[in-house]
Amino acid sequence: MSFIRRHLKKLVFVVVLALVAGALVRRRMQAVPVVATPVARGTAVEAVYATGTVEAQERITVKAKASGSIAEILVKEGSSVKKGDLLARIDNPVASFELKRGQVDLGAATSQKNQAPQVAALMASQKALVSDLDVATKAQARVRELHAAGAVPKSDLDVAESRVRQVEAQISANQSQQQALRIDLKANAERQAAVVESLASRVADTEVRAPQDGVVLTKLVELGEIVTVNQSLFRVGDTANLILEVMIDEADVAKIRDGSEGAPPSVAAVTLYAFDQQIFTGKVFEIYPDANRERKAFLTKVRLDAPPPGLKSGMSAEVNIISRKKPGVLLAPGVAESDGFVSVVTGGKIERRAVKVGMRDLLRFEVLEGLEEGELVVVEKPADLAAGKRVVVSERPMAPTDPMPDPSQPSQTTIKP
């Protein structure tokens, strides 16, 4: 009986082992589903990728010119303003008081300039001296006649003439004093006027005004808040002229052009998160000559050829600036290549093949060697798929072989890394 049980156990073990082996063989022979894309001819593109922000090309940060508390705010985000429009008022009672005191001092200085008591006294003295001169001149004439007749000595004539010269000198001195006093009074009034102008400017600085036509993009202050000189209060920009501002890494900036050196400006393909699945064309029109020291990147500006309705300042964008294009070359999906190798479907099986890569963009690469047009390269597969494995293929066509958008078809596949 024990002999039979031992043989039964061995038989069961052999059967189980055969079933497991059969399952493993069937599993190895079973085809694995993959997704593959045919190699095709098209335009290879070398692009510089960057993220950016929609901004008003002409925008200014309005800063406080005076310190104090915000007494009034007359605008909000989105308000349209004209140059010189009042945006807010800053309460600065000290400046207002000093202006009033300066205006009073200016009034007094102006009054003194026109009706100063010192000038009136000098004018009265001059009038008396003129009378004295008239008397002295007449006396001189009489003495001269008497001297000519021999009735008086020469010394009397000298005294009369000396008196005339003395009064004339006094009149001249009086006139000089009047002129000097008037100059001093005028200068004092002008100095006081300058003080009032300066104080008025300080008071005017408490009125925050729009520096240009546009829209209030940002309000950075609240009613009652204490502000200091040079503190940012508002951002005002011309939203009728929106552009993209992107930061280009220093390793890539030499690949693009802004049209300032004779070469045509670089073309950009732009996607905006607010306009899903659409690509817009644009051109680089300015590259800052100096890099941002912290980011080691250059601020670059792009103008859209046809900005979409609803474009707003502050929107985020992905920008592909085309640095080079090469038409009529073999292209394969970028996701198919890894470390210089691709998985090719040949005869229903996987073949691992080396490829030589040329230009590359965010979606595809130029095939220089290793693939032929029409061959299927795997773009989706299990992580452990080995060479020689049988596969079942689902074909997926390649994305547009020229990634630049057609202006007549505004909605296209988005280029993303």
Image (cartoon, grey):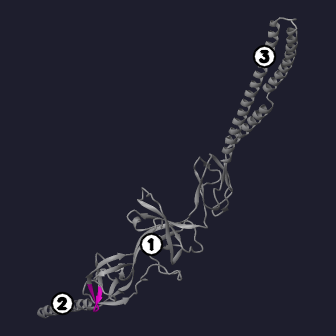
Could you tell me the amino acid type at mark 1? Answer: Asn
Helix, strand or loop for the magenta stretch, by majority: strand
- Mark positioned earlier in the residue sequence (2 or 3): 2
Q: Amino acid at mark 2?
A: Phe
Q: Nearer the viewer, residue 121 or 396?
A: 121
User: Disc number at residue 13?
Assistant: 2
User: Which amino acid does the dot numbered 3 rest on?
Assistant: Arg
Query: Distance of mark 2 from mark 1, alpha carbons?
Result: 64 Å
Disc sitting over residue 404 in the figure: none
Q: Position of residue 259 (x, y in %)?
A: 48, 67
> What residue range appears in magenta?
344-351
Write down the residue under mark 1.
Answer: 320
Where residue 175 appears, x then y in whole percent? 77, 25
Q: Nearer the viewer, mark 2 or mark 3?
A: 3
Q: Which residue is mark 3?
A: 165
Q: Position of residue 32 (x, y in %)?
A: 31, 88
Q: Position of residue 355 (x, y in %)?
A: 28, 80
Q: Is residue 109 above or below residue 56?
A: above
